[in-house]
Image (tube, rainbow, N blue to C red):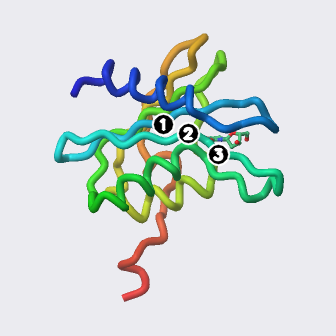
Amino acid sequence: MDLENLIEAAKNARERAYAPYSQFRVGAAILTASGKVFTGSNIENASYGLTICAERVAVFHMVHAGEKTPEVLVLVTDTEEPVMPCGACRQVLSEFSNPDLKIVSVPLRGQAKETTLRELLPYQFRLKDLQ
Ligand code: THU
């Protein structure tokens, strides 16, 4: 699976967003070490705070399937600037990835940006800190 295919998967996932309140549709796709792809889109709720972001849907899909080694996360938004995962998603990602998880944000009307989870969330609080 190359990056272009992963971006395609995230674009398709974005089409399945449920965002009647914000109209802001987000797609996410995770490639794991085993070569599998798990996707997610944002799913909103009339009780706004219960909304879940595309990134967490993709991570939970992956974990539920028994996988815990994401290698790349692609995010797709219909924006000019690349959108980065919110704080809650950064923490959830840190639970199930290595600190250097690669994150590629692809704005449909602009230039993609690549970063790492470590850059977005330095000094991560993780399971090892509880032991
Ligand atoms: N959202 C995501 O799905 N991922 C992000 O990285 C940013 C925000 C969603 C949540 C909500 O449904 C909508 O975008 C507007 O905040």
Q: Seen from this angle, which residue lies furthest top?
A: 109
Q: Is residue 42 left or right of residue 67?
A: right
What crowding class fits label 2: few (fewer than 14 Cα within 10 Å), some (14-19), or many (20 or more)?
Answer: many
Label 2 near label 3: C-beta < 8 Å?
yes
| Disc 3 secondary structure class | loop
Q: Three-letter amino acid code at disc 1?
A: Ala
Q: Three-letter amino acid code at disc 3?
A: Ile
Label 1 lies in ligand 1 vicinity (Cβ under 8 Å): yes
Which sits earlier in the primary sequence, circle 3 or circle 1?
1
Report which quarter residue 64 is drawn in: bottom left
Rendered residue at 53%/27% (across/down): 76
Residue 107 versus residue 52: which sits nearer the camera? 52
Q: Is residue 72 left or right of residue 93?
A: left
Q: Which residue is mark 2?
A: 41
Coordinates of residue 36 in the picture (x, y in percent)? 24, 42
Label 3 lies in ligand 1 vicinity (Cβ under 8 Å): yes
In the picture, the quarter occupied by the C terminus is bottom left
| Disc 1 secondary structure class | strand
Ligand 1 is found in the corner quadrant, namely top right
Coordinates of residue 113 in the picture (x, y in percent)? 48, 25
Residue 28's label in the rendered image is: 1
Rendered residue at 30%/39% (across/down): 37
Label 2 near label 1: C-beta < 8 Å?
yes
Q: CA distance from mark 1 to mark 2?
A: 6 Å
Coordinates of residue 88 in the picture (x, y in percent)? 61, 58
Residue 43's label in the rendered image is: 3
Q: Three-letter amino acid code at disc 2?
A: Ser
In the picture, the quarter occupied by the N terminus is top left
